[in-house]
């Protein structure tokens, strides 16, 4: 469940970036910041009420590329000033998602047991785009528990074409059959 | 010595005697008569009182007899009632104990049945899990990039056809 604050802030940023024509730059900035914020200490630093807002703002600006759009810097300042620094990783993730969707892509998650080659990734994307008649932005994840095949998550739907899923079905059938 | 009879002396003595008698009668006989009468009356009263006391005693004795008999009857009734109550309580206790034992027996049977079912269920799950573990090991040992690629292609085809679709639990 997404927090309304996260949703509203991210949507506002993406709409502003769209209107200013800086959607790609904002997304790149959000991706760069997300990488830095993945460090646990940085998150703690942003959440801490002892650290003053000006210090947090200066710190965040130093992490960004020099040509970052002004509206993105303002957005970061506003988020920190309002005391939502701790929510920044979630807000940035949503900014990335919404900026992708804003240019007509649908985000899906593809989970496989082994990392896929680029050609395989492209093959999967084009096949699904062809069938679903939409432009897709797949995010590939690796989970050895899948064993083989793949799992696709699209919105609130899950398409399970994995060996683990088939074995799970087999287990259910075996249990039902032996009752 | 010769005793002479003197008429005059004799008459005087007779008069003295009569006067003495009159005096005695007047002074002693009548009071004694009164005392004797009082004594007789008192004896009669005592006798009457004794008779009354005897009658009272007899009456009280009879009443006591009746009261004793009533007490016997009452005591018998009390004992009888107590015996019946004790029998009733004993019967109730026996019935209750029997009911509780029945319930315990039924519960024990149900628990045994449940435990049997659980054990059977666990054994079935264990057997299925073991079989699946063996299958997983077999798959892992035989899995190759080529087989995985085929599986992925087949899965994509099935997904594209709309198969294998589920709602994500807790999804939006």
Image: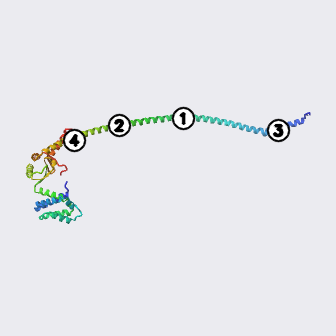
Please give the name of the residue rendered at 52% of the width and 34% of the height, measured from the top-left corner: B72
| Residue A93 in the image: above or below residue B137 | below
In the displayed image of the protein, which residue is found farthest to the right? B1
Query: From the viewer's perspective, is the residue at label 3 or at label 1 nearer?
Result: 1
Q: Nearer the viewer, residue B45 or A86?
A: A86
First in sequence: mark 1 or mark 2? 1
Residue B68, label in figure: 1
Q: Is residue A20 left or right of residue B105?
A: left
Which chain does the residue under circle 4 lie in? B
First in sequence: mark 3 or mark 4? 3
Find numbered disc 3 in the image and state the secondary structure of the residue it sits on: helix
Q: Are marks 2 and 4 in contact (CB under 8 Å)?
A: no
Which chain does the residue under circle 3 lie in? B
Cα separation, mark 2 vs mark 3, equals: 116 Å
Which chain does the residue under circle 2 lie in? B
Cα separation, mark 1 vs mark 2, equals: 48 Å
Instruction: Kindly indicate whether the residues beneath marks 2 and 4 are on one polypeptide chain.
Output: yes
Circle 4: is it few (<14), some (14-19), or many (20+) Cα within 10 Å? few
Report the residue marked by disc 2: B101
Residue B20, label in figure: 3
Please give the name of the residue rendered at 56% of the width and 35% of the height, measured from the top-left corner: B64
Instruction: Kindly indicate whether the residues beneath marks 1 and 2 are on one polypeptide chain.
Output: yes
First in sequence: mark 2 or mark 3? 3
Find numbered disc 1 in the image and state the secondary structure of the residue it sits on: helix
Report the residue marked by disc 4: B126
Its colouring scheme is rainbow
Cα separation, mark 3 vs mark 4, equals: 151 Å
Cα separation, mark 1 vs mark 4, equals: 85 Å
Residue A12, label in figure: none
* Quarter of the figure that contains the N terminus of chain B: top right
């Amino acid at each position: 469940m997404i927090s309304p604050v996260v949703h509203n802030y991210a949507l506002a940023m993406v709409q502003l970036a769209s209107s200013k024509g800086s959607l790609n730059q904002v997304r790149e900035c959000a991706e760069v910041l997300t990488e830095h914020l993945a460090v646990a200490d940085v998150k703690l630093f942003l959440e801490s009420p002892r650290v003053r807002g000006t210090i947090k703002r200066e710190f965040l600006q130093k992490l960004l590329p020099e040509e970052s759009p002004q509206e993105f810097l303002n957005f970061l300042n506003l988020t920190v000033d309002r005391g939502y620094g701790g929510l920044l990783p979630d807000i940035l993730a949503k900014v990335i998602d919404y900026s992708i969707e804003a240019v007509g892509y649908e985000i899906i998650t593809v989970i496989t047991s082994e990392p896929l080659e680029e050609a395989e990734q492209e093959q999967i994307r084009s096949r699904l785009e062809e069938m679903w008649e939409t432009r897709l932005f797949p995010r590939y994840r690796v989970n050895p528990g899948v064993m083989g095949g793949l799992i696709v998550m699209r919105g609130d739907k899950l398409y399970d074409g994995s060996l683990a899923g088939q074995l799970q079905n087999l287990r259910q059938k075996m249990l039902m059959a032996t009752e | 010595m010769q005793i002479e009879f003197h008429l005059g002396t004799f008459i005087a003595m007779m008069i003295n005697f009569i006067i003495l008698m009159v005096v005695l009668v007047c002074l002693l006989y009548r009071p004694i008569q009164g005392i004797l009468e009082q004594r007789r009356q008192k004896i009669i009263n005592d006798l009457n009182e004794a008779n009354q006391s005897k009658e009272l005693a007899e009456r009280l004795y009879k009443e006591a007899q009746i009261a004793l008999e009533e007490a016997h009857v009452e005591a018998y009734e009390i004992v009888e009632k107590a015996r019946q109550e004790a029998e009733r309580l004993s019967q109730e206790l026996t019935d209750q104990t029997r009911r509780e034992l029945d319930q315990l027996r039924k519960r024990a049977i149900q628990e045994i049945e449940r435990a049997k079912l659980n054990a059977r269920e666990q054994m079935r799950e264990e057997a299925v899990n073991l079989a699946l573990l063996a299958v997983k090991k077999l798959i892992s040992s035989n899995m190759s990039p080529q087989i995985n690629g085929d599986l992925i292609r087949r899965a994509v085809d099935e997904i594209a056809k709309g198969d294998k679709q589920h709602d994500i639990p807790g999804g939006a």
